Amino acid sequence: MKPIELRDARDSTADREWLANVYPFYLHDLSEFEDHYYRLNDRGLWEPDHLPSWLQDDEDLPLVIIESGARVGFALVNVAPSPHVARDRDFRLSEFFVLRRHRRRGVGRRAAWTLFERMPGRWQLSALARNARAIRFWRGVIEECARGEYDEVASSHELLYLFEAGPRRKD
């Protein structure tokens, strides 16, 4: 299995540029399941554009997912005391994206595990209620990562997952 690396996009001009160029693909994919929040404006640009804050705010961590030296996706993490993180949580996985040609090969799962091992603590993440693939993916990852100890809170718009993550435990 190829190792996964997570790299802070703020540390490299090339990574920041890559993230800025790929982020619209993520929003396009997300728009299939989200009717109201992200919209294309008259110039064909996605609004709102949260990427500048991801690259500037200290409470935000924009990570590029690397496999075999190639950028294959990203994870955007809020770190407490960010206003986007619930009081009883340490981290919020706000956005997670793997390029289509790298999906269904375990890249996302390995990237999630790498992230949770690198940043142990109390996590929150959500999946859009209409995104069945994401829900299946996150249920599987979280079930294994949290060893079955997690909360799933459903609303009409999303499923919220609350769990604790850390290094893999050996049985």
Image (cartoon, grey):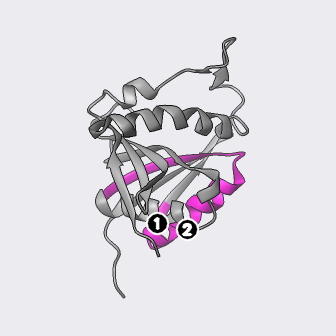
The reply to whether callout 1 and callout 2 are in contact (CB within 8 Å) is: yes
Q: Which residues make up the magenta segment?
A: 121-150
The kind of residue on which mark 2 rests is Gly
State the image quarter where residue 120 is shown.
Answer: bottom left
Residue located beneath label 2 in the image? 106
Position of residue 76 measured from the top left corner of the image (x, y, whole percent)? 42, 42
108, above or below 64, in the image: below
Residue at horizontal 72 percent and vertical 29 percent from the top: 35
Asked if residue 120 can be seen in this view, the reply is no
Q: Is-magenta flag for residue 145?
A: yes
Residue 102 sits in quarter: bottom right
Q: Vertically, is 104 above or below 73?
A: below
**Position of residue 162 measured from the top left corner of the image (x, y, whole percent):** 45, 54
Q: Is residue 42 above or below residue 64?
A: above
| Residue 133, magenta (yes or no) | yes
The answer to which quarter of the image holds residue 48 is top right
- Say whether residue 46 is left or right of residue 150: right
Where residue 74 is drawn, which disc sits there? Answer: none
Q: Of helix, strand and loop, which one carries label 2?
A: loop
Residue underneath mark 1? 110
- Where residue 41 appears, as percent x and y from the top left, is 66, 15
Cα gap from disc 1 to disc 2, whole angstroms? 6 Å
